[in-house]
Image (tube, rainbow, N blue to C red):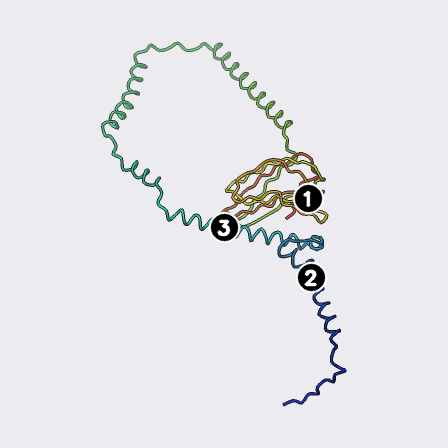
């Protein structure tokens, strides 16, 4: 057993010191909660410090992942319920497959198909041989066909050039997302500017989140799950970066083609 000296009353902290220490610890804890924990975990940034430290974007990604997980779970449950219920369409297909085939109709169709080429051959054999074209007529025919093809090619090229000149898109980007991968493209825009956009996914639908951030501000315009394509206008609520976050929840690679036009500075890959 160890003997220890008990502290004297003068060595013990006073009640005032304990209250001050407790109050100071509470203030520090509240400050850390507002500036670090809320932005990093829940994307809540009332002071703007989390955006400067890069914690708010981390919270936005965590929040989005949690929402996607909940939606995936709800979708799996709905699919399980649908699979457990018998489908009326399966019975219709089975009835159609089990319907007997009329052998007489099949034999009649086969006979008509065999008679048709024989009749055509007989008609060709009974007709007199048509006179062949003269060399000059053949040359004129070939020249006319070549001229028609040249005119058609020139017209197609002219239409393509006109379509390119009239295109409303200023930038176009194509990228591939592997299963579970996400990426983000944004436009630098001034407050009130309007940009047009259109994107399409090849290989399966994707999840997307149209949002913006900058100068301590953040906004979510639209979210979608399992969407194959989208188009419209994006009006900047404030000066900053505005664009799209895409995530591939399929079991295969997906190619996304994004086209943008209108009032913006540049299109950049943000993530």
Residue 239 x %, y %: 72, 42
**x 59%, y 53%: residue:** 63
Q: Is residue 96 above or below residue 181?
A: above
The quarter of the displayed image where residue 238 is located:
top right
Residue 159 x %, y %: 59, 23
Quarter containing the N terminus: bottom right
Q: CA distance from mark 1 to mark 3?
A: 29 Å
Residue 187 x %, y %: 67, 41
**Disc 2 residue crowd, few under 14, some 14–19, many 20+, Cα 10 Å:** few
Return the residue found at the far left: 104
Count of numbered circles in the view: 3
Q: Secondary structure at mark 2?
A: helix
Residue 228 x %, y %: 52, 40
Q: Is residue 49 left or right of residue 182?
A: right
Q: Determine which residue is flagged by label 2.
A: 32
Q: Determine which residue is flagged by label 1.
A: 241
Label 1 with label 3: CB-CB less than 8 Å? no
The quarter of the displayed image where residue 19 is located:
bottom right
Q: Secondary structure at mark 3?
A: helix
First in sequence, mark 3 or 2: give its number.
2
Q: CA distance from mark 3 to mark 2?
A: 33 Å
Q: Is residue 49 left or right of residue 206?
A: right
């Amino acid at each position: 057993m160890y003997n220890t000296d008990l502290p004297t009353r003068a060595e013990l902290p006073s009640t005032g010191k304990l209250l001050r220490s407790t109050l100071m610890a509470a203030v520090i804890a509240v400050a850390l909660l507002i500036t670090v924990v809320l932005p990093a975990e829940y994307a809540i940034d009332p002071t703007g410090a989390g955006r400067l430290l890069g914690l708010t974007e981390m919270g936005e990604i965590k929040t989005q992942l949690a929402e996607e997980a909940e939606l995936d779970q709800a979708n799996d449950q709905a699919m399980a319920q649908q699979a457990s219920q018998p489908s009326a369409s399966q019975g219709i297909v089975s009835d159609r497959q089990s319907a007997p085939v009329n052998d007489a109709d099949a034999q009649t169709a086969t006979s008509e198909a065999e008679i048709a080429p024989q009749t055509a051959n007989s008609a060709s054999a009974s007709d007199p041989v048509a006179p062949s074209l003269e060399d000059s007529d053949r040359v004129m025919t070939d020249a006319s066909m070549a001229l028609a093809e040249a005119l058609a090619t020139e017209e197609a090229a002219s239409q393509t050039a006109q379509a390119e000149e009239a295109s409303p898109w200023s930038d176009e980007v194509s990228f591939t997302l592997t299963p579970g991968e996400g990426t983000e493209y944004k436009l630098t825009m001034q407050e009130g500017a309007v940009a047009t956009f259109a994107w399409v996914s090849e290989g399966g639908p994707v999840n997307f989140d149209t949002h913006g951030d900058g100068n301590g501000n953040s906004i979510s315009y639209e979210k979608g799950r399992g969407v194959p394509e989208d188009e419209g206008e994006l009006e900047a609520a404030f000066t900053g970066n505005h664009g799209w976050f895409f995530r591939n929840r399929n079991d295969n690679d997906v190619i996304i083609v994004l086209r943008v036009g209108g009032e913006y500075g540049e299109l950049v890959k943000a993530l």
